[in-house]
Amino acid sequence: MKKHVGDRLRVTQFHRRGEVEPRSTRNGLAKVATLWLCLLCATKPFAQTPDAADQGTATITTFNVTEAGTGNGQGTFALAINKTGAATGYYVDAINVAHGFVRASDGTIISFDVVGAGTMPNQGTFPCTINDAGEISGWYIDGANVSHGFVRAADGMTTTFSAPGVPFGGPSGENKNARFSINTAGAVAGYSANAKGVYHGFIRAATGKIMTFEAPGAGNTTNRGTAALAINDSGTVTGTYVDASGQTGLEHGFVRSASGVIASFEAGPGTLNGTVGGSINSSGVITGVYIDDKNVYHGFVRAVNKTIKLFNVVGAGNAVGQGTVATCINSAGMVAGSYIDKNYGLHGFVRAAAGTISKFDVPGAGTSKFQGTVGVSINSTGEIVGFYVDATRVAHGFVRSP
């Protein structure tokens, strides 16, 4: 199967089947980024704040969509939560078709399908982001395996879209693992690929107007280009781009101001892999992943003054396909994500703004390779949503309340 920028986003959402298979090679935006730790050069040491007691006083609530399948790679995948505690994501049914859902803070779940979504295996509806007004954005794959974007209002009305001149794939369903982000104004940031496999960032205003953009230095050949991954309430966007160097290119983080000024940044001195800006809060603080030259992942926090702190969760592995993945940051500067241990088991973590890290595992999570707990999104009150993969490789949603 052809790999693409969506596979890079297994860094941030561990793939929709809950599998985090490491790779030792890359192909620009096309390869799965291999995971985390290894010591950087002595001139830029990692911060390793002692971890707080696992679990602590937090409460974890698990849930499943009734119609979710119970086979390998099926189940409920919770991917985003807003300040009211409403969560969204999708579930994979018994015939491997994806459907969207929204879960209210009281536990009530409503499932939905975008009109036009395909009904064959690996097709369907894939919500991935929700704002504080309850608007949901994501993508769907139609019966021809072509991907399209959508925005669903809180009342359930859905609008579909595609970036002009930049189709979401083609017969191969090029962008079925794409990631979008929606802010409180209803603006959506994301990326798509053209017919040549070049990726372009875009911003879709609440009015429906879509503007595409390229990070300076982004390559314009297959599996290179620009991927917008997150947008905050002021319209500032972060993401990653792959340049034109070498056979595969190098990934760089970027931040794009609301006025359109784009600046690149590096979280570490990597010369083979690079930096992914994955989430940005209302103050402009960015978190994401730095992939070192040994294909080990490290979390980072980039402050508004451009200073960057790298961090690792104690217990994260230090081989190819292991390490620390920071996926999201809230308005208080709390970062959530997951780490992969030396046996490729998955565990959740939350890092306070001061740097203290607490680890957690959802009861019932599997303990074998590519099983465990995946923290995906954190809201302003510190609630974390994600999913866990059990011993039979079935996914289940969870909400962790502080």
Image (cartoon, rainbow, N blue to C red):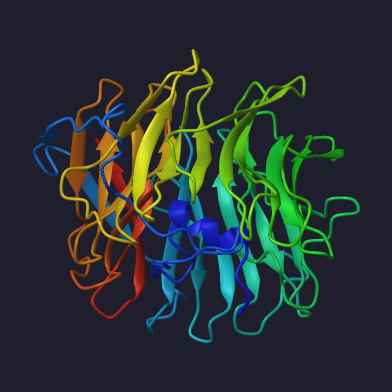
Tell me which residue sits at (85%, 55%) in the image. Answer: 166
Question: Looking at the image, is 216 positioned above or below residue 89?
Answer: above
Q: Viewer-proximal residue, 6 or 156? A: 6
Residue 286 in the figure: left or right of residue 169: left
Is 80 left or right of 340, judged from the image as shown?
right
Report x, y in % for residue 10. 47, 59
- The N terminus appears in which quarter of the rendering? bottom right
Residue with the most extreme left position: 53
- The percent coordinates of residue 132 (x first, y second) are 55, 33
Taking the image as shown, residue 191 lies to the left or right of residue 136, namely right
Quarter where residue 144 is shown:
bottom right
Q: Closer to the camera, 164 or 140?
A: 164
Is residue 352 found left or right of 228 in the rendered image?
A: left
Q: Which quarter of the rendered picture does the C terminus lie within?
A: top left
Q: Between residues 101 and 211, which one lies in front from this camera angle? A: 211
Residue 34 % position (x, y) = 41, 60
Seen from the viewer's position, the closer of residues 244 and 333 is 244
Residue located at (69% from left, 54% from top): 224
Camera sees residue 152: no
Residue 167 location, quadrant: bottom right
- Where residue 275 sits in the image (x, y, percent)? 50, 41
